[in-house]
Image (cartoon, coloured by chain):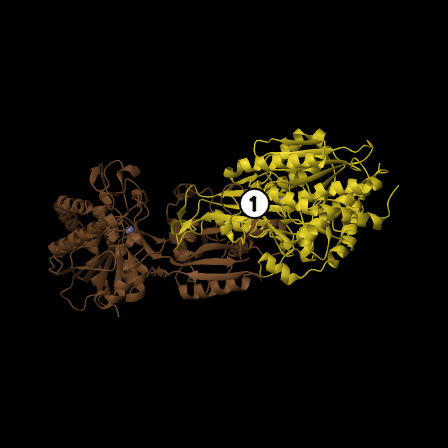
Chain colours: A yellow, B brown
Amino acid sequence: MSQSVDSAVDAVRAYIDQHRAAFLDDLAAWLRIPSVSAQPEHAADVHRSAEWLAAKLQETGFPVAEVWPTPGAPAVYAEWPCDDPGAPTVLVYGHHDVQPAARADGWDSEPFEPVVRGNRLYARGAADDKGQVFFHLLGVRAHLATTGRTTPAVHLKLLIEGEEESGSPHFRALVEQHAGRLAADAVIVSDTGMWSEDTPTVCTGMRGLAECEIRLYGPDQDIHSGSFGGAVPNPATAVGRLVAALHDENGRVAIPGFYDGVIDLTDRERELFAELPFDERQWLATAKSHATAGEAGYTTLERVWARPTAEVNGIGGGYQGAGSKTIIPSSAMVKLSFRLVAGQDPAHIEKIVGDWVRTRVPAGIRCEVGFSSATRPCLTPLDHPALQSVVRAMGRAFGKPVRFTREGGSGPAADLQDVLGAPVLFLGISVPSDGWHAPNEKVELDLLLKGVETSAHLWRDLAEHWRHAP
Amino acid sequence: MSQSVDSAVDAVRAYIDQHRAAFLDDLAAWLRIPSVSAQPEHAADVHRSAEWLAAKLQETGFPVAEVWPTPGAPAVYAEWPCDDPGAPTVLVYGHHDVQPAARADGWDSEPFEPVVRGNRLYARGAADDKGQVFFHLLGVRAHLATTGRTTPAVHLKLLIEGEEESGSPHFRALVEQHAGRLAADAVIVSDTGMWSEDTPTVCTGMRGLAECEIRLYGPDQDIHSGSFGGAVPNPATAVGRLVAALHDENGRVAIPGFYDGVIDLTDRERELFAELPFDERQWLATAKSHATAGEAGYTTLERVWARPTAEVNGIGGGYQGAGSKTIIPSSAMVKLSFRLVAGQDPAHIEKIVGDWVRTRVPAGIRCEVGFSSATRPCLTPLDHPALQSVVRAMGRAFGKPVRFTREGGSGPAADLQDVLGAPVLFLGISVPSDGWHAPNEKVELDLLLKGVETSAHLWRDLAEHWRHAP
Ligand SMILES: [Zn+2]
Ligand SMILES: [Zn+2]
């Protein structure tokens, strides 16, 4: 029943070659819709983008394709069941909204007028995320055409959000509302990237996030530092001491209990990270930083991908204008964010951070500690069968070994993991030079088509290797 | 030749009683001039105040009374030489400008329409500083009338500044420009206060001041805390660590060399401070603070009057708005002020603070340390003969023991000490309830007249006890 691997690769490529022009025309049409979720004047465009995508999914063959309203911008949901009820269910996540863009920001062409220069397609959303959503549409058709199937080999579901670039304010509620229909054995997130054009990679996890604001209150109003200085507690000094106490001399977070439950990197994962062609100078240039610094005993990649952090996002208190003002300020504040790794629970972090602040604040200073909504970390073990399928599908498309990365940021994918209880896998073909959120965003056409190929191989591989899963 | 002490006291009081009504009428006329130096719309009023005072000094008998222009508001200078060329020279310092005031700020009557309620005179400037300048005018006349002299017993000079409430931006240059004419053996500053109505005190020194702003620069722009967090130095964290390193666990300033040269409190001074009826609860209420804190081993009064400090006046960096922003900020800053005590040199402090910051800033962070103009501390030893004269004169006026305080703030008086090389003495009769810079500023009439009495006794006492000084 199964074709040989080589002939499958060739068949998929031949199918894609045949349909490449129409595929790119369709994508360009979608990219012309300025679906900027952060700008109210584009609200209608975001709706139009959702309607356009739902219609295109129906045209592609999805028997179900719906626009799901939210209190903000709408999402698109589509479903294409497998004719084998016992097949695994996979949910693809992406987003159809884009970052703001204007020619005047430094674009060489109109951001919403897609243009191919060289082997690149330039447009806002080309890589983040319309291009990476769209490769699944040709992917599933290539899968069907080259396997002779009439339905995908897995129960295929898509959830394409409309507010990702606005912080996904209604996403979790949407997922909770539709949890039954969204139920899946695995989630495939196509909203990330890979190491480089030459080094295809699969991301195995994202860090989580807990954010807090600490406010310290001292004297009931700003008071004179001559009359009172040296004899009363200063909340700006206290906030500095809190910040300094966040880390120990090895760069580890010094809040008691912070590392509770942390799943350490395995030796194998550290080896795999070390195999990546990492150039620290290049990384520093991207970071626009003038040195590396962090937890002792870990490399830069390990620090940003696999270690939890405490960072100061903002600090303030007292007089910040020109010149000087001899006051002891009445209050001071600091905004902290904690990146979390697998095994850490945001609720536990909130509790220990609150306790830690309260025990450290000196007499005469009152504190308020407030947390905003948190994001859980996610991590898929290297030996997870669905992860192995993604690696094999990508390996077939690229014809070279696939390596592993993680993602230091945090995203709404974790909500899917939480609510649906499914592992999250990442399939992205974007490269760091694609310019997400920047002028002249582009996607490499070769890589975009490798995304189509990967998608075409993935569903069959998943079905074959998961049939016997418990 | 000398009257008995008792008869001198009675004679001065009798003279003052006779002239009290005219004295208060004149002061009220001056207080009606809204000489607010900080408000450009009152520039003409500040000039009018200077002209009014110069004319009144001439009327009082000063053979020299001049308005001295500055690039800002004018000062008033007056001189009344002693007929004995060998007499000591004393320069009185005060200011004729006032803080802004408006009825709507919470005044019970018009701030520039002086009114007597009970035994208090309410008006902006009643205590700070017109009332305390003005008591010298009746004082010198009482001195002459009751001693039968035609000139004061000392060479008497007055310098009444017009920009004190605006930070005295041109004062030092003015003093340098006229250093020859201002030359004096001692400076009497009448722009402070005393402990309380029941406890007359003489201030023996003021703290100095050095102020700096430290700016730390990390990444070339704000960068994403997910992508880079945990692996690059964060300037907001670095600024917190600097703040935390300012003090050791005993509340001492931990910058190496900070205490170089500090003249410690003597046991006698500590005893004298301890004799004051200090109520820490009352002090905390005034400070609007909820606890005391500071250098171990010192009382609150010692901390604010006689110990040097490092205070954070302002701190800032990164995102300070509502909600959160997951960035590593590009820069952060802190504004520090150091109160200095006798023996400390602002230039040395600037050097060691700069060195300290530079050695502590981590790799990848660039720092800028900028100092604004500094003020030297001043301190007159308890056994200084001019200080003894002030104490005796005040004791005669009040009929009770005079105790000693210091002032935690810093003022332009230190410029006089620096440029003229003369010790600075403080003669003030204002009390903490007088409401400097606040609505309903007032002066206690009984204390104001004690000021007149003190001034009347002072010049003779100084001449008698300084004749034989080297
Ligand atoms: Zn995206
Ligand atoms: Zn004043």
Quadrant position of the C terminus of chain A in the picture: top right
Residue B261, compared with residue A435, is above or below; it is below
Residue at mark 1: A99
> How far from the left and from the top, in percent, is residue B326?
57, 47
| Location of residue A170 by image quarter | top right
Q: Is residue B399 left or right of residue A314?
A: left
Q: Residue furthest right?
A: A1
Res. B142 visible in picture: no
Residue B369 picture location, percent across and down? 46, 61
Quick one: quadrant of the N terminus of chain A? top right
Quarter of image, res B213? bottom left
Within the image, what quadrant is residue B108 found in? top left
Q: Position of residue A118 (x, y in %)?
A: 63, 56
Please state if B85 lies on the left or on the right of A46 as rendered.
left
Residue at 17%, 51% (x, y): give it.
B48
Subunit of label 1:
A
* Type of amino acid under label 1: Gln
Quarter of the image where ligand 1 sits: top right
Q: Is residue B193 visible?
A: yes
Q: Label 1 CB, ligand 1: below 8 Å?
A: no
Estimate how packed mark 1 is, as few (under 14), some (14 to 19) or many (20 or more) residues with alpha carbons within 10 Å.
many
Front in this rendered view, residue A274 or A143: A143
Residue A181, given in percent of the width and then of the height, sits at 71, 30
User: Which element is circle 1 on?
Assistant: loop
Q: Is residue B219 above or below residue B13?
A: below
Counting every numbered tag in the picture gives: 1
- The residue sitting at 81% across, 31% down in the picture is A85
Furthest residue in direction bottom, as rendered: B470
Q: In screen coordinates, is A162 left or right of B442?
A: right
**Residue A100 or A23: which is nearer the viewer?**
A23
Q: Is residue B80 left or right of residue A374?
A: left
Residue B415, placed above or below residue B438: below
